[in-house]
Image: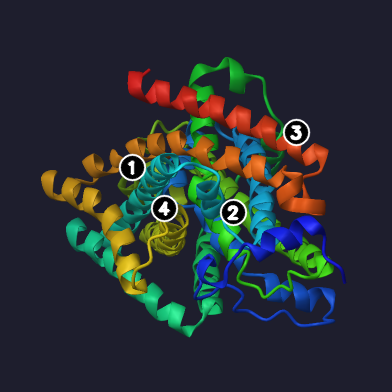
């Protein structure tokens, strides 16, 4: 089948040695003439890696605190945030499939050397900010499960990069499978805990309908902004544009490109729907167990202890619930660190075109994130409360970096010369710009509130 002039021209400029995640790019064969379900199974996987970024440890405290303070009201915020995420991630996957390049590569190509370097620094800070939350979550989970010093737990999380290197040798499907297993653990744990909590079904349904009090109540508005700001992660946009290229697609065929976009979008939406379920369960758990108890739920340890305290959660209190919470926290942290490390490689290669041995690249990315957490752990003598304060600062970095990922994404996918017939439809384009403007405003507000301490 003939290809469009725009697509052919662009693909020809993408040299074989400039592929995103070169070792896995186009490594998975897509069966010819297969039916819908078999084709979907082939494309299922990247969406799982994307979804873990939307339910990482950085989201947990905010979601559970939202339920504990305002019952089910903020479920509507979780729903809106998830819909925005689905829109942006589908655009990210489409960008990678159509152009054969990831968001970092395209952004670098269209900026000056100095501008590209500045954007790289911002993206690296975003990776570090994301990893900090994941490392803290994993480190604390290891301490809670095995009663070992937090510093040792943090060092163990640094070693998980070696596991990723091993998985890469076994194939990208193995990475997708292990992350999917970890996500399933998180989902099942919270389904079980919410089932025991016996939440109000009518209250949950009503919570998905936006309430005016979200805007009029200052405390509710601030927490809502925290949920939105912590949901859409900049590193996921870079990651999505890259791992969407792991499936082997004939770029000379518009039909094959369209099929890849279709099934990648379905995969992404299914997995992000699961992330939406997990985030909803977190908020529902907070509402069912902690609403009206005036419990201090500001830290992971507080949540761990509360689940085994009958004075807080009533008759269902059990050490088993606490241990399951820690297992889910560890699963969340480990699955997120895998995707964070991949994102670090994408950003480093895309922005500064730094080629180095794979093991060194992985190790460097992990050390950049582990170091500040380790310094805090040593300085504050293993005090979890002080170390978890890093989570607040990490969200500020993410807020700053977010526009620098979203704006190029919307511009590129709305560019007729770059995308050809796969350019954003008008409703997608305007919806994306509206969501982008809203997210920027909300994140600026969050930054101001965090700095001023209001």
Identify the mark at residue 299; answer none if there is no mark: 1
In the displayed structure, would residue 192 be above or below residue 452? below
Residue located beneath label 2 in the image: 275
Distance from Cα at disc 1 to Cα at disc 4: 18 Å
Residue located beneath label 3 in the image: 430
Indicate the position of residue 187 as horizontal and vertical percent values: 55, 60
- Say what secondary structure mark 3 lies in: helix
Which image quadrant: the N terminus?
bottom right
Residue density around tag 4, few if under 14, some if 14–19, many if 20 or more, within 10 Å: many
Residue 265 seen in the figure: no
**Depth order, front residue of 351/263:** 351
The first of marks 2 and 1 along the sequence is: 2
Which image quadrant: the C terminus?
top left
Q: In the drawing, does residue 15 fall left or right of residue 167?
A: right
Residue 296 position by quadrant? top left
Indicate the position of residue 450 as horizontal and vertical percent values: 37, 25
Indicate the position of residue 400 as horizontal and vertical percent values: 44, 34
Q: Nearer the viewer, mark 2 or mark 1?
A: 2
The first of marks 4 and 3 along the sequence is: 4
Residue 2 seen in the figure: yes
Residue located beneath label 4 in the image: 317
Contact between labelled residues 4 and 2, with CB atoms less than 8 Å apart: no
The first of marks 3 and 1 along the sequence is: 1
Q: Nearer the viewer, mark 3 or mark 1?
A: 3
């Amino acid at each position: 089948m003939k290809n469009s002039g725009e697509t052919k021209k662009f693909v020809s400029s993408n040299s074989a040695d400039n592929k995103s995640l070169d070792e896995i790019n186009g490594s998975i064969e897509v069966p010819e003439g297969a039916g819908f379900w078999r084709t979907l199974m082939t494309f299922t996987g990247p969406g799982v890696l994307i979804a873990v970024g939307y339910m990482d440890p950085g989201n947990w405290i905010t979601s559970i605190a939202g339920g504990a303070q305002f019952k089910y009201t903020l479920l509507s915020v979780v729903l809106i945030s998830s819909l925005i995420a689905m829109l942006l991630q589908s655009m990210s996957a489409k960008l990678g499939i159509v152009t054969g390049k990831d968001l970092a590569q395209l952004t670098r190509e269209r900026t000056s050397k100095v501008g590209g370097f500045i954007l790289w620094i911002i993206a690296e800070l975003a990776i570090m900010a994301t990893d900090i939350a994941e490392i803290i979550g994993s480190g604390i989970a290891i301490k809670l499960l095995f009663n070992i010093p937090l510093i040792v737990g943090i060092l163990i999380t640094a070693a998980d990069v070696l596991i990723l290197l091993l998985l890469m040798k076994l194939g990208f499907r193995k990475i997708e499978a292990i992350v999917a297993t970890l996500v399933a653990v998180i989902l099942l744990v919270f389904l079980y805990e919410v089932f025991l909590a016996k939440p109000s079904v009518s209250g949950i349904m009503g919570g998905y309908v936006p309430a005016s009090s979200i805007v009029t109540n200052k405390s509710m508005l601030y927490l809502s902004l925290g949920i939105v700001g912590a949901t859409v992660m900049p590193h996921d946009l870079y990651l999505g544009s890259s791992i969407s290229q792991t499936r082997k697609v004939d770029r000379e065929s518009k039909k094959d490109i369209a099929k890849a976009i279709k099934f990648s979008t379905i995969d992404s939406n299914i997995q992000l729907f699961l992330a939406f379920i997990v985030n909803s369960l977190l908020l529902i758990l907070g509402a069912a167990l902690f609403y009206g108890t005036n419990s201090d739920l500001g830290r992971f340890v507080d949540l761990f202890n509360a689940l085994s305290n009958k004075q807080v959660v009533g008759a269902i209190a059990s050490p088993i619930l606490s241990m399951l919470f820690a297992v889910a926290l560890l699963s969340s942290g480990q699955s997120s660190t895998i995707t964070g490390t991949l994102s670090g490689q994408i950003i480093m290669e895309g922005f500064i075109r730094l080629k180095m041995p794979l093991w060194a690249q992985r190790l460097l990315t992990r050390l950049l994130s582990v170091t500040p957490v380790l310094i805090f752990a040593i300085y504050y003598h293993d005090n979890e409360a002080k170390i978890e304060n890093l989570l607040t600062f990490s969200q500020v970095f993410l807020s700053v970096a977010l526009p620098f990922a979203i704006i190029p994404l919307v511009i590129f996918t709305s560019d007729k010369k770059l995308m050809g017939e796969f350019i954003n439809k008008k409703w997608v384009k305007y919806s994306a710009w509206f969501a982008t403007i809203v997210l920027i405003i909300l994140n600026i507000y969050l930054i101001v509130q965090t700095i001023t301490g209001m």
